[in-house]
Amino acid sequence: MFPKWMAAVTNGALLCIVFACLALAQTCEVGSTRILNSCLANLGVQRMTAASSGYGDASLAFNRRFSYKPAAIVYPKTKDEVSLVVKCAAAAKAPVVARSGGHSYAAYGLGGQDGALVVDLSSMKSISVDQSSGLAVSQTGNRLGDLAQYIWDNGRRALPHGTCPYVGTGGHASYGGFGLYGRTAGLLLDRVVSAEVVIANGSVVTASAQSNSDLFWAVRGAAPSYGIVTAWTFNTLPAPANLVNYWYTFSSSLSNSQAVGIIQAFMNFAASKPTKQLQSVANIGVSNGRVYVSIMGTFYGSQADFNTAIGPLQSSFPGDAGMSLRTTNRDWYGGLTEFTGSLNTGGPDDYDNFFAKSLFSSTAYSQAAITNWVNYMTQQGNSAPVLWWVLIDMYGGSVSDVAEDATAYAHRSAVLNFQIYGYSSNDGHNAWVGQSGIDFINGLTSSLDPNPSAAYPNYIDPTLTAAQWQSLYFGGHMDRLKQLKATWDPNNVFRFPQSIPLPS
């Protein structure tokens, strides 16, 4: 054992080394930023740095819980300009991230850390549709609303995607974007037939089943770790001619047991794997100490067929829960916009201060688990430090028809997809409350499932450990993803806190 004086000297020396390393790291970061911006300045690509007048607004996160300072934000107009800026960043050893819509829950579109090069794709918004094949080529600066509106206007075409028009097509297509057409038509990434990708050395390559098929596998589930997808080619579908949108509401004074009965009925119905033409979403929260539940969704077909398909769910609701059903009959566009509102993305985007968790389950939870969950809602949830809600998407259908290993997306067998979301007051516009909000959402999640086996990567949780997120988001695909990282990005150019790491 060292004498105390030797231990003190040793500890002091270690502290000196630590501080020296920290100083060196800061010096290297400053040097990297200087080298990067010197290179970028010679390219003629629109750029913002910390010295630019619009930098503060341009570097605001959608989730204002986070604040990061990119080394630079660039606005390329072509794939060749994307190639040039990637080469600059690689030479400067600066991390590179793409920003499509900027809605990453963890602000990874800003790097998830200081010092990243943000490649903002908002100037790359070309879309075209081949009327004979139905193939749509869409640059990654397009939002979901832009894409949905264009393909409807040009051939009455449709794609499966979410219901938030301002969400970017980049992250949505990369990580398994899902919506009310998902059980019928699959994930948005399942409609991808090729991707135009700028890789780490600045080359522009095509990834498809016929060309660079290993990269094609990786970008359909984890694209931002391998390059910048500048354009997607989607195999669009003829828009359904008719559909039924529906809403179930229940009493505003549900007892806990009634709420449990409704939630159990919904989960059991999802686990029964009903027709793929039906999508349902349960919305759950607490008001005045009582759990509220509503269920909405879309059926792709006639009213008569909807009545048949929804019958088993409706008949399983508690008889004393005050159930009411409302339906509307629409065409594709009317049905979509009834949930999304206008698809126009020309106005300012909103923001939030929030923390979210997600769960996938391949079975319904037990009555005991749901009871424990509902009890947590009415006890801790009634006086929570944040506002909150839960959404449960009925999952599966056509998503499950694709083989588990066909793409890097790893959650084909699930029948339920949960989002547990907490946000600050004033509709998320006030400052975040701190750790207490995170603790509450973690508690709400674990009160249903203390040991989840899968989670949804588009509802990213930056508080997870590396072992947790690699398992929850990518499951058994992680080893292959790491090997492909070494093949396509051996110097880890495209990196952020939860990017696919190189093999150890």
Image: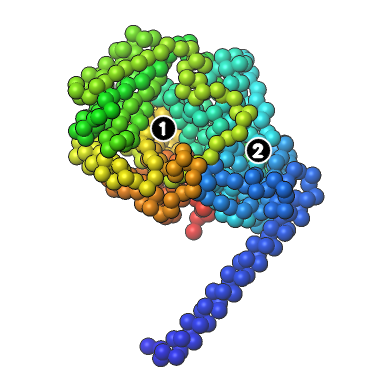
Q: What residue is drawn where x is 41% and y is 29%?
A: 399
Q: Are marks 1 and 2 in contact (CB under 8 Å)?
A: no
Expressed as whole percent of the image width and height from the top left, the position of residue 263 reads 27, 31
> Dot 1, crowdedness within 10 Å: few (<14), some or many (≥20)?
few
Q: Which one is in front, 476 or 94?
A: 94
- Judging depth in this view, the residue of 442 and 174 nearest the camera is 442
Of the residues under marks 1 and 2, which one precedes in the sequence? 2
Measured as percent of width and height from the top left, residue 454 is found at: 37, 43
- Could you tell whether 458 is left or right of 195 in the image? left
The residue lying at 27 percent from left, 35 percent from top is 290
Q: Residue at x 36, y 20 (%)?
A: 247
Q: Quadrant of residue 354?
A: top left
Q: Quadrant of the N terminus?
A: bottom left
User: Which numbered dot is residue 121?
Assistant: 2
Q: Is residue 90 left or right of residue 382?
A: right
Would you say 497 lies left or right of 327 here? Answer: right
Q: How many marks?
A: 2
Q: Is residue 118 visible?
A: no
Which element carries disc 1, helix, strand or loop? Answer: loop
> Which label sits on residue 403?
1
Q: Label 1 vs label 2: CA separation?
A: 32 Å
Q: Is residue 318 above or below residue 108?
A: above
Task: Determine if residue 379 is in view.
Answer: yes
